[in-house]
Image (tube, grey):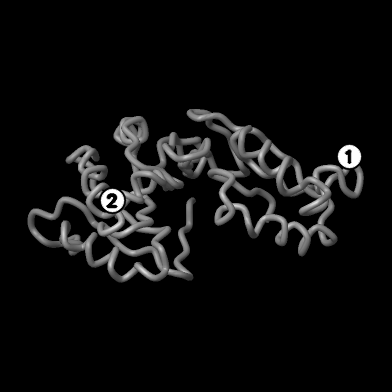
Amino acid sequence: VNHVLLTHCHMDHIAALPLMLDACTSLRKEPVTVHALQATIDALRAHVFNNTIWPDFSKLPTADRPFVRFSPVEIGQTFRIGEREVEVMPAVHTVPACGYAVRPATPTGAAWWIFTGDTERNPAFWARLNAMDVAALVIETAFSDRERDLARRALHLAPATLAEEIDRIDQTKHFPIYITHTKPAETEMIMAEVLRFDDTDVFANGVRHDVRMLRVGHEFEVG
């Protein structure tokens, strides 16, 4: 792993990073590059890589040759990682957050694989997505509808809100939508509620969305 893209600073999205760096740094000659919003980088420096919770790997073993390098990103920015193009997508969460869109850098005009990150209602995201050629969308739905009020306060999606959000997709666009970030104890309930509002048989007449569950071990190849 040479590059890590973080969406925000919450524990469930950064917890593996210090341990991953600790496990692999002695085998590397170049630092791992962590791409994240500046606010996320600031939080990591202040609360994780602070020589109290964890060593400051951005200065170890030396400041000139560290184990990790932080690369700040901004919403709307595009950049290259090897043979892939990345765009930073907007998100609406309780802390500064983003999503990411990734596609092969060549051929020009290749379709995007898009990940929302943690987000609630997000008009700017859908406006940008509708201007893109999309191969697949991965979107969070953290809570069931019985906890939709909590989901709204925590700025996460529940199935009813998800239904409203994906109806923002241009009706001429068709691509698989993968559900992720479900609370483990509610995964079956959440997916049952999601499937209640949409037929997922991509070949059925009148299907509006192709909604699927993102499962452990699922791999995507981008380019």
Which residue is denoted by mark 2 in the rendering? 175
Which residue is denoted by mark 1 in the rendering? 63
What is the x, y in percent for residue 118? 44, 47
**Dot 1: within a 10 Å radius of its alpha carbon, few (fewer than 14), some, or many (20 or more) residues?**
few
Callout 2 secondary element: loop
Residue at position x 38%, y 44% from top?
Answer: 153
Position of residue 220 relative to residue 157, above or below, is below
Q: Quadrant of residue 128?
A: top left
Mark 1 touches mark 2? (CB < 8 Å)? no
Residue at position x 87%, y 48% from top?
Answer: 60
Q: Nearer the viewer, mark 1 or mark 2?
A: 1
* On-image quarter of the N terminus: bottom right
Residue at position x 45%, y 36% from top?
Answer: 89
Distance CA(mark 1)–CA(mark 2): 45 Å
User: Which label's residue is closer to the chain start, 1 or 2?
Assistant: 1
Q: With 104 as the anchor, is 39 left or right in this view?
A: right
In this view of the protein, which residue sits in the foreground, 55 or 207? 55
Q: With 52 as the anchor, is 130 left or right in this view?
A: left
Which residue occupies the extreme left position in the image?
205
Inspect the image, locate mark 1, and give the three-letter code of the amino acid beneath it.
Ala
Which residue occupies the extreme right position in the image?
62
**Dot 2: within a 10 Å radius of its alpha carbon, few (fewer than 14), some, or many (20 or more) residues?**
some
What is the x, y in percent for residue 152? 34, 45
What is the x, y in percent for residue 21? 75, 57
Callout 1 secondary element: loop
Inspect the image, locate mark 2, and give the three-letter code of the amino acid beneath it.
Phe
Q: Which mark is residue 48?
A: none
In this view of the protein, which residue sits in the foreground, 51 or 128? 51
